[in-house]
Amino acid sequence: MENILEKESVKRVIKVLKEFDQNLEVQILKSLAKTADDAAFSLNCKVGAIVKSLLLRTENGFILCLVSGDKRCSLNKIKKIINLKDVSMANADEVKSQTGFSIGGVSPIAHIKKFPILIDLSLSRFENVYAAAGHPYSIFKITYKQLIKITNGKEEDIV
């Protein structure tokens, strides 16, 4: 396997993590973690502790939703929260052009463009959560409270 820590997308995540807290670090997994189930299996943790980073397209741009791995994002709830009628999942090209990450490795941090971030309250069940770090084999562990701070995300009921 190529050196994942040398990938540009992973280096961006490492830089943001280190600027936020020197103790946070990217972990390389032995198996693919493209889905929340895969990641939970690799980490031997509950699927709910996996952070799914979902990019949504709205009539005004994009919004990132951080959702617990065992939950599904509710477009209707998000429409009400952001007061817009047109909200849908971004396609793979949009995800790459807005975040700088490919689907399966979208991190909640270190995006190449800025957009609002909503964090689902169901993630608060876990003291520590795990999020993608720019590649399907890389993740980082962070406390729920740190996740809110590092993303400047707004906690909402979005599932």
Image (cartoon, rainbow, N blue to C red):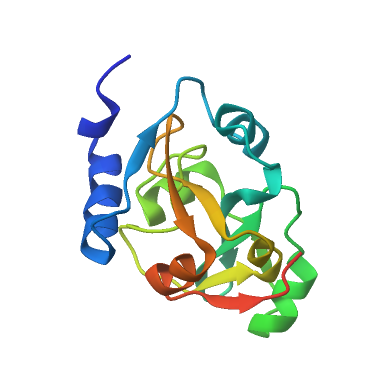
- Residue 101 placed where, x, y %? 39, 44
Q: Is residue 32 left or right of residue 48?
A: left
Q: Position of residue 80 (x, y in %)?
A: 74, 82
Q: Quadrant of the C terminus?
A: bottom right
Q: Nearer the viewer, residue 134 or 19?
A: 19
Is residue 54 at all visible to an observer of this figure?
A: no
Q: Position of residue 61 (x, y in %)?
A: 49, 70
User: Does residue 92 appear anywhere in the picture?
Assistant: yes
Q: Quadrant of the N terminus?
A: top left
Task: Work out whether 159 lies above or below 100.
Answer: below
Q: Residue at x 44, y 27 (%)?
A: 29
The residue shown at (45%, 49%) is 141
* Left or right of residue 77: residue 31: left
Residue 140 placement (x, y as % from top left): 42, 46
Q: Residue at x 62, y 32 (%)?
A: 44
Write the residue at 30% across / 58% down. 112
| Front residue of 74 and 24 | 24
Q: Specify whether 159 is left or right of 94.
A: right
